[in-house]
Amino acid sequence: MTEKLDRKKLEEHRINKAKEIALRKGTESSTSHKYHILVCGGTACESNKSDEIVRLLKEYAEKNGIGNEVLVVKTGCFGFCSQGPVVKIMPGRVFYTHVEPAHAKDIIEKHIMKGELLLRILYKEQREHRDFSKEINFYQKQRRIVLKNCGMIDPENIDEYIGNDGYKALSKALFEMTPDEVLKEMQISGLRGRGGAGFPTWKKWSFTKGVESEQKYIVCNADEGDPGAYMDRSILEGDPHSVIEAMTIAGYTVGASKGYLYIRAEYGLAVDRVKIALEQAYNYGLLGQNILGSNFSFDLDIRLGAGAFVCGEETALLASIEGNRGTPRPRPPFPAIKGLFEYPTVINNVETFANVTAIINNGGNWFASIGTENSKGTKVFALTGNVNVSGLVEVPMGTTIREIVFDIGGGIPNDKFVKGVQTGGPSGGILPESLFGTHIDFDNLVELGSMMGSGGMIVIDEDSNMVDFAKFYLGFCVDESCGKCVPCRVGGMQMLKILEKFTKKRAKEDDIQKLKDIALTMRKASLCALGSTAANPVMSTLKHFEEEYRAGIFTPPVPKKN
């Protein structure tokens, strides 16, 4: 049985394990391994045989008698998704991309043993400039707070998490801070919920803390269902302990003794790694009774979602955890006051929780110094679509869309014209190229008819028809509607039928106004955010690309003159 850690033992453990991590961070290290080979183990790279690459790298290192000099680590997602599988070698900051199992032998026998660069798989930027002293362009404008461990540590090894300041924030909160002091730091930080609406995290926690109740709950919303979005999944795959630690801190702050991670069942790798992380945390005494020898006890468990998009809405999610059909309920009362099993409940999404430990370790003022006046910190985006380098991107709030698409994403393939970007998933909107100078934050995007959402960002090039694009997202919302309220159930279907007329060039002039009228009704009368925002892609494309709608209006043929 693993020895449970108290505060002193945790710190001793961290000091010992930090020696391994230092080499990967480019700092002095006393590790016994001369080289660390980091192999991406996210879902996409695993599907491209990264497990086999890891196995072969270890095998060839042993065969050549250098097994003690080389540490091969399967990490979480590097974020460099379009270039995967990715292998990074430290020291040296060498990025090998599109790696195949057949390359493992040369990585060991040529790069490690002879110091030869494998030019055919060396990332093109490093191949062209041979400058390994700085980060490649994809990372240069990023600031990785949430993703700091993704691509850095083995997510299935709690010791590596501890070695990179893991559970330090929990120890600090339990032994150096009162719940009120934790809440104050959260308030100073200005952290807003990363799940969509951007509600102040401290305020949600304070509501639950202020309610007298025999039972309170902490719930992590990992029901990420937006097409093209995989931020939360990648965080759980690459750094599950950061969420577990943050949920425990939240429990201490508001007086909760129980929590649930609600993860959609399709996220098999994320579920597996969270299960491993929970078992490790319990074994070390970082969950359960008297955590780290304190008087605080907290338990965590997993609940699997069946893939219903509407269960991303917090009241529908709670209904699902309770074993009921996942449908929203009217608010108030809000879950913070009356939530899971009718007890006060804090619900935050994965990315929100993943910011908490950095805030406690570095202070609220540190976090508040990043970002804009009303949107603090960083935001993780899944950059996909018609862009040269797609992947996970974490940038300070206030970064422009143009910087993300062109400086980080490398622009549009085949030098095509970029038409716009879609942000916020099915609930968001499409912003044209003329607005790419927009500084991204919660308020700016809403003002322009879109929203931050959970963080999907899909780039659209000149070949895309915006009516078809809007129709796809509206169709998704229609399919995913729970059907409980009329505005969403009926309104969405009626809008979809009208869009069908535009795509077949059978629309009438007044169909544009009909779309606007139905959208307004859905926005004002729907029970939850799925219905109230479902028309956003239609309205934003109608605003910025009206000519493409008008091209679908039927024009009767001119009668021939006799």
Image (cartoon, grey):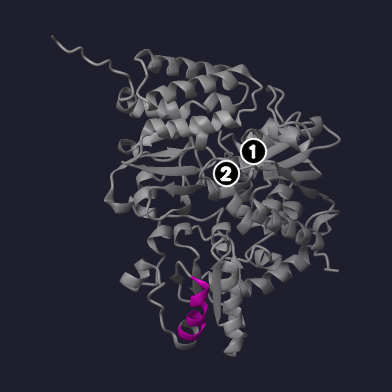
Percent position (x, y) of residue 506?
Answer: 36, 20
Above or below for 483 versus 265: above
Q: Say left or right for 194 vs 124.
A: right
Q: Say left or right for 483 vs 286.
A: left
Q: Residue at x 49, y 47 (%)?
A: 381
Q: Residue at x 81, y 49 (%)?
A: 299
Above or below for 557 versus 454: above
Location of the N terminus by quadrant is bottom right
Residue 88 seen in render: yes
Residue 358 seen in render: no
Percent position (x, y) of residue 138?
Answer: 41, 58
Q: Which amino acid does label 2 sit on?
A: Ser
Residue nearest the viewer, comparing 174 with 62: 62
In the image, farthest residue toward the top: 562
Which disc, if any, is residue 79? none
Whether residue 102 appears in magenta in the rendering, the answer is yes
Q: Which residue is drawn at 82% across and 50% down?
A: 296
Above or below for 4 versus 439: below
* CB atoms of marks 2 and 1 within 8 Å: yes
Location of the C terminus by quadrant is top left
Q: Say left or right for 484 vs 42.
A: right
Could you tell me what secondary structure mostly forms the magenta stretch? helix
Q: Which residue is drawn at 48% across and 20% down?
A: 519
Q: For the image shown, how many numbered marks are present on the structure?
A: 2
Percent position (x, y) of residue 251?
Answer: 75, 44
In the image, farthest residue toward the bottom: 65
Quadrant of res 135: bottom left
Q: What stretch is highlighted in magenta?
A: 100-110
Sequence-first disc among 2 and 1: 2
Which disc, if any, is residue 202? 1
SS type, badge 1:
helix
Determine which residue is flagged by label 2.
Answer: 189
